[in-house]
Amino acid sequence: MAVAEKIGQYKKENDITILQTNRWNEVLERALRQGQSVGLTPEFVEQYLAAVHLESIAHQSRVMES
Ligand SMILES: O=C(O)C(=O)C[C@]1(C(=O)O)C=C[C@@H](O)C=C1
């Protein structure tokens, strides 16, 4: 999560909100396409990435509040 913390620091310094809906949709759609190409179900990709996204947001929140 070191990268997420760097992103959090950048967002803090530039007054950017943690949740970026358009960016998140881009990340998710790319992962769904890549997952499909190697036989992963959309449900698995969505659940896996949702967990990563949640953890990333938690780390960014800690940086924001520090
Ligand atoms: O790309 C960003 O802006 C991030 O902060 C990364 C990330 C992610 O973990 O993929 C986290 C929060 C945003 O909602 C979108 C994407």
Image (spheres, rainbow, N blue to C red):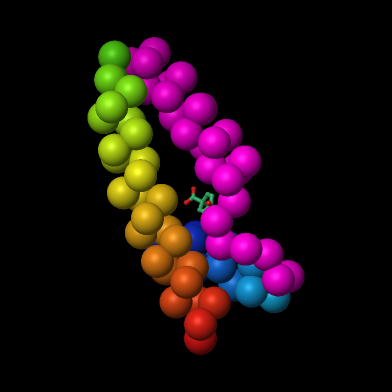
Please provide the residue range marked out in magenta: 14-38
The percent coordinates of residue 57 (x first, y second) are 44, 61
Principal secondary structure, stretch drawn in magenta: helix
In the image, what residue occupies the spot 42% across and 24% down? 32
> For this view, does 14 lie left or right of residue 61?
right
- Quadrant of the image occupied by residue 62: bottom left
* Above/below status of 54 relative to 6: above
How many numbered marks, from 0 up?
Answer: 0
Q: Residue furthest bottom?
A: 66
- For the N terminus, the quadrant is bottom left
In the image, what residue occupies the spot 35% across and 50% down? 52
Residue 31 belongs to the span the image colors magenta: yes
Q: Is residue 42 visible?
A: yes
In the image, what residue occupies the spot 71% across and 71% down? 15
In the image, what residue occupies the spot 51% across and 86% down? 66
Q: Is residue 10 visible?
A: no
The percent coordinates of residue 31 (x first, y second) are 44, 29
The percent coordinates of residue 47 (x first, y second) are 29, 38
Residue 7 belongs to the span the image colors magenta: no
* Above/below status of 43 relative to 8: above
The percent coordinates of residue 38 (x first, y second) are 33, 16
- Quadrant of the image occupied by residue 21: top right
* Above/below status of 56 relative to 39: below
- Quadrant of the image occupied by residue 6: bottom right
* Above/below status of 25 relative to 4: above
